[in-house]
Amino acid sequence: MTASMDAAELLRCYEQMAIIRGTEKAAHDLFLAGLVKGTTHLAAGHEAVAVGASSALRPDDYVFATYRGHHHAMARGATPAECLAELMSKATGVCKAKGGSMHLTKASAGMLGSYAIVGAHLPLAAGAAWSARLRGTDQVAVAFFGDGATNIGAFHEALNLASVWSLPVLFICENNLYMEYTPIGSVTAVEHPAADRAAGYRLPSEVIDGNDVVIVADAVGRAADRARAGDGPTVLEAQTYRHFGHSRTDPAAYRPAEEVAQWLARDPLDVAAGRLTELGVAEDEITVAAERAAKTVADAVTEARAADAADPAQAFTDVWADGGHQWRT
Amino acid sequence: MTASMDAAELLRCYEQMAIIRGTEKAAHDLFLAGLVKGTTHLAAGHEAVAVGASSALRPDDYVFATYRGHHHAMARGATPAECLAELMSKATGVCKAKGGSMHLTKASAGMLGSYAIVGAHLPLAAGAAWSARLRGTDQVAVAFFGDGATNIGAFHEALNLASVWSLPVLFICENNLYMEYTPIGSVTAVEHPAADRAAGYRLPSEVIDGNDVVIVADAVGRAADRARAGDGPTVLEAQTYRHFGHSRTDPAAYRPAEEVAQWLARDPLDVAAGRLTELGVAEDEITVAAERAAKTVADAVTEARAADAADPAQAFTDVWADGGHQWRT
Amino acid sequence: MADLITYREAVAEGLSREMRRDPAVVCLGEDIGAAGGVFKTTVGLLAEFGPDRVRDTPISEQAIVGMAMGAAMTGIRPVAEIMFSDFLACCWDYLANEIPKMRYMTGGQVTVPLVIRTANGGGLGFGAQHSQATENWAAAVPGLKVVAPATPADVVGLLAAAVRSDDPVVFFEHKGLFASRGEAPPAGHVVPLGQAATVRSGADITVVALASTVPLALAAADELAGSGVQAEVIDLRCLIPLDMATVLASVRRTSRLLIVEENPYQGGWGGTVASIVADEGFEFLDAPVRRVAAACVPLPFADALEDEVIPTVAKVVAAMRSLLDY
Amino acid sequence: MADLITYREAVAEGLSREMRRDPAVVCLGEDIGAAGGVFKTTVGLLAEFGPDRVRDTPISEQAIVGMAMGAAMTGIRPVAEIMFSDFLACCWDYLANEIPKMRYMTGGQVTVPLVIRTANGGGLGFGAQHSQATENWAAAVPGLKVVAPATPADVVGLLAAAVRSDDPVVFFEHKGLFASRGEAPPAGHVVPLGQAATVRSGADITVVALASTVPLALAAADELAGSGVQAEVIDLRCLIPLDMATVLASVRRTSRLLIVEENPYQGGWGGTVASIVADEGFEFLDAPVRRVAAACVPLPFADALEDEVIPTVAKVVAAMRSLLDY
Ligand SMILES: Cc1ncc(C[n+]2csc(CCOP(=O)(O)OP(=O)(O)O)c2C)c(N)n1
Ligand SMILES: Cc1ncc(C[n+]2csc(CCOP(=O)(O)OP(=O)(O)O)c2C)c(N)n1
Ligand SMILES: [Mg+2]
Ligand SMILES: [Mg+2]
């Protein structure tokens, strides 16, 4: 059983969340400035899920995320600069500008990808957990996914097989009440799309406050301990909310104003700040952390802007393990 | 609520089951005689599920079955002769010898197909139920599937959507304890692969004796009444057993002898005969029904043997609704 | 001249015309109702036809297409939307094994009159899992009809034919064309499936194109017209049925063939067209049959890289020149 | 002469050789353990390597292939079995969108060294959903290597290369060849991916074949040898990498090309081969490029009907004659 985090760790998490928030804000501004192309799915509002989980996981554990994955990439160690560079199609992008916002990956930090086909990565996380077992390590694998992913076939197949093989994998649903523009409640037979399905796979589950980084860290810590102990998978349903629309083109007009207001009032950064104060951390310590975060983001923007554009020749590398793309003689 | 069947209906069901049993026995013999090609999946032992369900359903209801579907085709009205002719590649086959054993279909009787991709037909049944709703009829659709189908994605997607739209569809699992050669218990997280999943879709479920035609008819009748009343889908798990291997090439050596013996002792034909006796039906009435069934099968074999072989030109018909196969000019 | 509508508007227009005409036509898919579709191609349908005929679904591609099939087998004419054509892979069993085979396997007992609409193709910087041109996947499956319109009028006319078809149709709407404008088609406009359109006449070279590559081919033809080359541009409109009669008749006149497709060269639809011409049109040819196709790599995110991979006017012009200089 | 083994036995032999060599190689699939596989291609593996390395799965094709991918990304070399190649459609998202794109999308951060084995093809009367030749599906996806052996020795040698490859490989085992016999390969036998085999030399016509069509092409060549025709038969062995150098060099000598494939003509792999030859080999050709492919219909159950649809020796002989008489 992992102990609840101390003030120092909580302050680190607060700063990490502020960095993620600031980096996404910068990405949004760069998009408006025409410097970010394609589409982006901001995780603003979800930061506590990623930072809390990473705080409870080990560096050698594996994380699999969705196209809404900026927070997971950075929480696991991708730098704001290499993430922004990716979105800006720069040569220094974390994926060489070949993946983009929807596919941020930092394999060296165990962040094994952001997947843009809903639900597809749940079996992958189970497979990574199986691999850990086969290699005799006690690593765990974690799949983060949205509420909408709970109604697709891959979810069902992954949870059943992970349970039968008792794999060290965590299935963590970031339930933000909506799919793209449609409420999850209108297309799902049960109230808690992930947690209420767990029993069908004989798996334990918990519905938790996804906006409280400490609650997330504790729940993930417990689940990871179970997994490492050989007790199999856990389903966690973290209740959270996205501060913006589904993607950059979405004003999110379909969300009732009171609902939005109520959730903005539970901003994970404010919740963490409140906890810090409770723990006796001085107001200015928190301010200093926020300022450090702002500086980190500002430096990242400068670095990403200064980086070279991706070389078009890169379009023809990395198809095969030999680095090339030759498919015929 | 459908009333439990009377002696006359039970006797009809008994005879129907005997016809199915005899027709499959004949198919097996014809296979050994080299007159049936490809593969066959005998339903021997499952007859009560098909005949009981058909007894409770209406002629205008829809049934979707699997590659193990001889019993459903005949229970819905496909004649033994046209089924045997199909297996024997005759022109008079119920699918013109283009489908074969795995795809027996009798659309005119609401038997909308036998599907050989595990689980694929569950969404189809939901769609037929949706269609009935859209057309303002009170038809119900039924998907029969095996225990193994409960671990594939299409099962999950179909049950969730059918529940959310409260469709008039029945999901009936024929749990015969095995997939091909592997016990379902070894690859499924819950004890009852279908019934124990129902709650995850907020659906009612029942585990029933699939070898007792009366119990099946009553359960299906109740579920159909609910569906027609607009109360949505029901999951039924009928416990049964196949008397032979998975398919013609399988001696089923993986099944413990005691298990086989115990189930053979609960042959659905014997169970029905016992009930008939309880209802005061005379022994010779039952014998006469059995003899009629044997005669029906013998005539069917004669008819199928006498039929012309399928015309090779038929390979190029029925691709398109216009009857042809032209894909280019 | 007639008023203009966008390709995007044409989809909603085509759908509503058919839904007004036939009450058996219903739509289902993700976010197609209140949201009007993520590409705004179903705007107005919920308001006009109501929630029974315009249904939002969960993220369940197999259930969407599988339910459409079951409904189509029992008297309904469903139009199912799969948001991005890449996601056809999530319900491929239905497109490859169920829908196209049902009629044949049952000896003609059952028909499956449905349409699967999907947003196809690249050029928007959506990355490897949201940018593929997958019409070749469907064109490789006997039993499916495959449509890919290039203009708003064709969207309406081909959608009408697709919805009225008793055969299953996969209808590819190109993401890169949604914002393009064209003449609004008259009432009752129907374009029969399987008839290519010769959108530019010329005697020097035949350029066969589809959907997004039609404007590329036309731009390239215009560019070469400057140097006195008269190129004939054929918009196939459909891959199945495939109008080879129009292609072969054109090559007979021009003796030169360039195929421009967004599919990767490996397994792209151009291979089937090229092989038919290399067989049945062999004697017409005065030059090699050439294909401008996507490079055989996944689609990269950065637009500078994506341009390297997908067909461009410059690549088409260069290929045309190489054949003309042959 | 060396002892003979069946193609079926060669699969188990090839797998066990690699599992002995490298402890990171594991197998998963339906009924592959105690049952030894429904085609008996994994007989003996469970006994030798135990349940941790030879795992039976539920009927969950997406989980089978998806877990193999996750394991391959983290230090394991999984060999996943998809029982019939038709069922690849049930996990197509993994083959089309995940496995082949992961390395590219991440800028080379991740490799996916896995093998997906599957029983492919028709001729056994299994009907429309269990008889398809689907190697063209995989060959249309950049990022996958595609192998389809024709002999027991190639099964062992190509499986060794596939398992050792750091790239994902789809390995098509032909159902119609399982019972065929051939020489047992020596220890350490490895056949590099992407090298076609010229299995019969001749100067009059080039016949390109793969897997089940190799014996058809050889039989047809023998038949025509009677009338003095010397046909060259090339077994491609792999579709990706595609050994066009061998094909083009042969056509340069023979000036005639026939392609024999089990895929339907629409979208079959032969279209890609034909289009390359019609472009780069145009000057070599003295006759049309022709393809003997499966008819564009689903596969019927009755064998008399199935023979009408798939390639046969008679069809190959007739096509060869038509090109030789040209
Ligand atoms: C298989 C598949 N279907 C549809 C989509 C399109 N799509 C992208 S995100 C999304 C909504 C996902 O909602 P949810 O799982 O709740 O995640 P969230 O976006 O709320 O984080 C949809 C439908 C997709 N990417 N993949
Ligand atoms: C998607 C898919 N995977 C695998 C198969 C091969 N297969 C055919 S029957 C079968 C076992 C099915 O078991 P179950 O659902 O219990 O039905 P039963 O055969 O026992 O009636 C399998 C694995 C298939 N047909 N479809
Ligand atoms: Mg959500
Ligand atoms: Mg079973």
Image: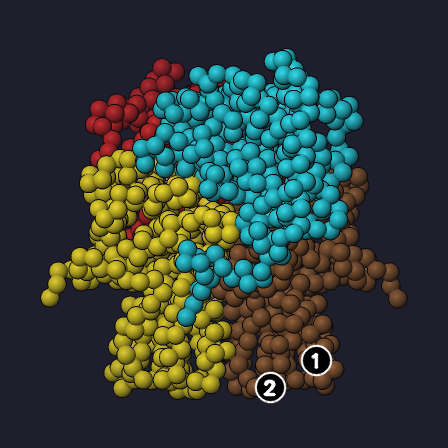
Chain colours: A cyan, B red, C brown, D yellow
**x, y (%) of residue C238?**
63, 64
Task: Give the letter of the chain under mark 1.
Answer: C
User: Residue C70 appears in which quarter of the rendering?
Assistant: top right
Q: Hey, what amino acid is under mark 1? A: Leu
Residue C110 against residue B118 in the figure, above or below: below
* Residue placed under numbered mark 2 in the picture: C325
Residue sitting at the far right: C1
As rendered, which of B4 and A198 lies closer to the eye? Answer: A198
> For the residue labelled by badge 1, is the local secondary structure a helix, a strand or a loop?
helix
**x, y (%) of residue B43?**
35, 36
> For the residue labelled by badge 2, is the local secondary structure a helix, a strand or a loop?
loop
On the rendered structure, is A247 left or right of B298?
A: right
Residue lying at 61% horizontally and 66% vertically, measured from the top left: C311
Location of the N terminus of chain D by quadrant is bottom left
Q: Hey, what amino acid is under mark 2? A: Asp
User: Residue C225 appears in which quarter of the rendering?
Assistant: bottom right
**x, y (%) of residue B226?**
58, 22
Location of the C terminus of chain D by quadrant is bottom left
Labels 1 and 2: the sequence-earlier one: 1
* Residue placed under numbered mark 1 in the picture: C224
User: Residue A73 appears in which quarter of the rendering?
Assistant: top right
On the rendered structure, is B223 left or right of B165?
A: left
Residue D316 against residue C269 in the figure, above or below: below
**Mark 1 surroundings: few (<14), some (14-19) or many (≥20) residues within 10 A:** some
Residue lying at 54% horizontally and 78% vertically, measured from the top left: C289
Task: Give the letter of the chain under mark 2.
Answer: C
Residue sitting at the far left: D1
Residue B224 is at least partly visible in this image: no
Residue lying at 23% horizontally and 48% vertically, measured from the top left: D21
